[in-house]
Image (tube, helix red, strand yellow):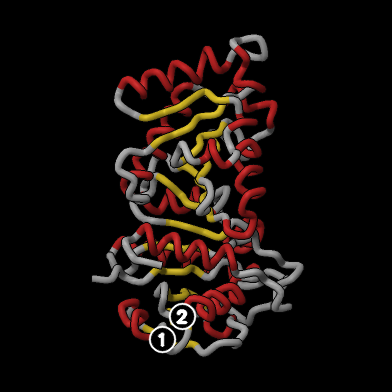
Amino acid sequence: MSPAPIALSCGEPAGIGPELAEAAWQLLGDEVPFFWIGDPAHLPGTVPRVVVTDPAVALRAAKDGLPVLHLPFDGPRTPGVPQPNQAIGVIDAIERGVSLVAQGKASALCTLPIHKQALQDGAGFGFPGHTEFLAHLAGSDEVVMMLASDQLRVVPATIHIPLAEVPAALTPALLEARIRITHAALIQQFHIAAPRLAVAGLNPHAGEGGKIGGEEIEVITPVLDRLRAQGMQIAGPLSADTMFHAAARAGYDAAICMYHDQALIPIKTLDFDRGVNVTLGLPFIRTSPDHGTAFDIAGTGQANPTSTVEALRMAWRMAGGTA
């Protein structure tokens, strides 16, 4: 039996989201059934669309056009210029997607990019971003960001903080939580029975036995030893400069890195357009294209839909579909 279709939230109307939704349907058709949650008046109109009231209908409707679950917004789309009065609609689309996944009417949630400043200005949005809002809606205590493609999966242990603050933020409890959530998600959502993890060191050459920093000895190794004793397959701490060539990548299913750029530079170098943002630790599947609203090209037809297409495909595979 085929999974339920994927819910695709509209994101910021003034960005490239509406164009990406149409381009994704044009490339995928009913290969990956999804429905877009938003105001149909915001779509560019380059492809046929089918307004649906029940997500179940999207499985059939996707053969004929982009299935749209109508969510009215206040006013028209203005490419490149966010309208504060539309912030409530953007938030409602996310909440509707989460609700439909929770009800089993959607198999996963794929989110198009939002603009945090527009949400704060127009609706007093009190969350740093999409991920934290989704965790709040789901009641999840802790979530993990993964960037994934067919070539590599990476998880940064620390994310959007200054590099100078990483050593203090990198506590044993934080690192252990990141690893445990990643390990569980690889089993439950990526269907890998016995995940293999590679964990980077913080310092050059993984500290070189304490000569170039002590975090590997004092923080990272004790955590890895404890988890290995519990049966996890973990290599590390490894020198990050030797972890990402082809032969090394063949030896693990995901890499845990210590800070943002250590994780994101390799995947963006290897597979820039096809990287997908996956949120681990939620009680449902959530993917997103790995880029922003791109106000500078919104409405011009120049948006590249590759990451959105890959995000939908990955969500569909994780849900048990084939694509």
Looking at the image, which residue is at 44% across and 16% down?
222
Residue tagged by mark 1? 63
Q: Which residue is mark 2?
A: 29
Of residue 99 and residue 126, the one placed in the foreground of this image is 99
Quadrant of the drawing holding the N terminus = bottom left
Q: Position of residue 248 (x, y in %)?
A: 53, 36
Q: Residue at x 72, y 67 (%)?
A: 295
Residue 235 location in percent, x, y?
46, 27
Q: Is residue 120 visible?
A: no
Please give left or right for residue 171 compared with residue 176 in the image.
right
Tell me what residue is drawn at x 60 percent, y 34 percent: 259
Indicate whether 237 appears above or below 131: above
Question: Between residues 91 and 113, which one lies in front from this camera angle?
Answer: 113
Tell me where residue 98 sits by quadrant: bottom left
Q: Secondary structure at mark 2?
A: loop
User: Which amino acid type corresponds to the residue marked 1 in the rendered image?
Assistant: Lys
> Sequence-wise, which precedes: disc 1 or disc 2?
2
Q: Residue furthest left?
A: 1
Amino acid type for the residue under numbered disc 2: Gly
Report the Cα–Cα distance between label 1 and label 2: 6 Å
Circle 1 — which element? loop
Is disc 1 in contact with disc 2, using a CB cutoff of under 8 Å? yes
**Where is the C terminus found, in terms of image quarters?**
bottom left
Above or below, 248 against 165 in this view is: below
Neighbourhood count class around disc 1 (C-alpha, 10 Å): few under 14, some 14–19, many 20 upward: some
